[in-house]
Amino acid sequence: MKKTLLFLAILAVTSFAKAQPRMQRNPEEVAKRQSEMLEKRLGLSADQKAKIYDLTLSQAKSRDSLMTAARNGGGDRKAMMEKMRAQQNESQTKIKAVLNDTQKAEFDKWQQERMDRMRQGMRERGAQNNEG
């Protein structure tokens, strides 16, 4: 009986967690968060941080407008994802232009770590979907 109640409690909590919508951040919050994170990770100067904030704000506004259009039924999802990927690549190039060589190497390392985590998460979700 206790195991059944525990199972039902866990099921209820996980169902509730999945039902919660992801909190959407506005472009200013996204740019602030990313520039602060890069400042900490890469040891940015105040000037570098300000430039990166401006770059990430511009990218976040553009991504936000693409997402809004997609939510309103505007267009092809695949085309939107390609545009977002192109914007991301352009943004990374502009960010790297602000960094020194040591910071660029650390930025590349961080980007690779993020990609690895994302791929791992996708594999795990795929395995979970195949089990259920």
Image: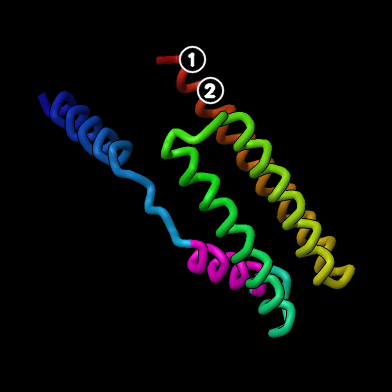
Residue that extends furthest to the bottom in the rendered view of this protein: 46
What's the residue type where badge 1 is placed? Asn
Do residues under tags 2 and 1 come within 8 Å of each other at their CB atoms? yes
Q: Nearer the viewer, residue 7 or 119?
A: 119
Q: Quadrant of residue 11?
A: top left
Crowdedness of circle 1 by 10 Å Cα count: few (<14), some, many (20+)?
few
Pointer 1 residue: 130
Tell me the colour scheme of the image.
rainbow
User: Residue at (76%, 60%) from the top-left corner?
Assistant: 107
- Real-space Cα distance between discs 2 and 1? 6 Å
Which residue position is annotated with label 2?
Answer: 126
- Part of the protein shown in magenta: 27-39
Q: Residue at x 45, y 15 (%)?
A: 131
- The quarter holding residue 36 reads bottom right
- In the picture provided, is 63 more to the left or to the right than 74? right
Residue 94, given in percent of the width and then of the height, sits at 78, 62
Q: Position of residue 108 (x, y in %)?
A: 79, 55
Q: Left or right of 129: which side holds 61?
A: right
Q: Image point 51% across, 62% down: which residue? A: 27
Q: Residue furthest right?
A: 101
Q: Judge left or right: residue 5 versus residue 80.
A: left
* Camera-nearest residue between 84 and 18: 84
Residue 6: percent from left, percent from top: 18, 32
Is residue 36 in the magenta section?
yes
* Amino acid at circle 2: Gly
Q: Using the image, determine if residue 45 lies above or below residue 103.
A: below
In this picture, is 67 found above or below 41?
Answer: above
